Amino acid sequence: MRLDKLLRERGIASRAETKQLVAEGRVLVNGFLPENHSMDCLETDVIAVDGREIIAVQPMYLMLHKPAGCVTATRDETEQTVMDLLPEQYRAMSLFPVGRLDKESEGLLLLTNDGSFCTRVIEPEHHVPKTYYIEVGRPFAADTEARFANGILFPNGTLCRPGVIEVSDDRMSALVTVTEGKTHQVRRMAAACGSKVRYLKRVSIGKLVMEDTLLPGQCRELSEDEMKLIFES
């Protein structure tokens, strides 16, 4: 496996970050500096980053109710992150968030140390739907449903894939389902239709629904049956 892919799957660094780490001489493979960030490695190779040996750990899958006010990141110099919410027993598991929820949003967030699983959930070509409940400051326009169904073009030229929006009777809230995760995508899609999002909560990924009993800031491990629900269409 390529070095950059191996570090990504173990939740250590992205491919771009691995390239930078290798360039800075902070990665060793079997005690030697690697030729480049994309060199092939064996599972038996001893890899160290900043002097710390990277050890493969048992795959772990968590459901977290992310509260508003913390950032979806593994570390941040100034902000509380979702990793700060985890109980102590999970802190040494090399976990990382599966996708992102912006700071002011809340709801279902998955965490794992399994890079392949993360890719299957977040990459658009796998078509895993994510559903959000939103409330807006002004009623949705009459053509909102049609615009979502056709895909929305943002002012910067970015085109979103078609999504589904189920607008409430008073047109002040909705359920939105998308299969990709562009930055602030749901907020930007609503804004493109003339309605600013005041509240956003992710309620499901695939057919995995976050239960009401999981309070903001709480997490738990996923069962095998729940794992299957994520990838059911």
Image (tube, grey):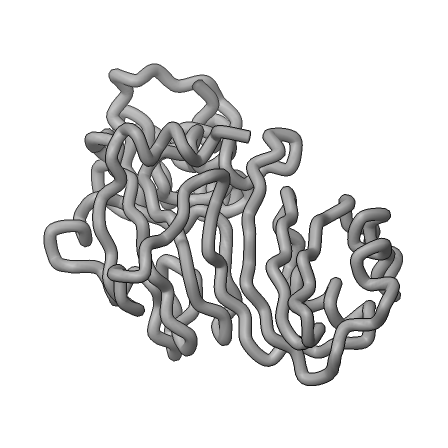
Q: Is residue 68 above or below residue 222?
A: below
x, y percentage for residue 209?
40, 48
Q: Is residue 111 above or below residue 215?
A: above
Residue 149 lies, in percent from the top left, at: 80, 48
For the N terminus, give its image quadrant: top left
Q: Tell me which residue sits at (65%, 31%) in the image.
A: 125
**In this rendering, position of residue 41 left or right of residue 155:** left
In this picture, is 103 found above or below 36? below
Relative height, residue 56 to residue 137 (above, below): above
Q: Is residue 74 left or right of residue 199?
A: left
Instruction: Report the residue at 55% width, 52% height from top.
Output: 131
Q: Quadrant of residue 48?
A: top left
Nearest to the observer: residue 183 or residue 74: 183
The percent coordinates of residue 51 (x first, y second) are 24, 44
Q: Residue at x 77, y 45 (%)?
A: 162
Q: How many marks?
A: 0
In the rendered image, residue 114, in percent from the top left (x then y), is placed at 35, 34
Q: Is residue 85 left or right of residue 136?
A: left
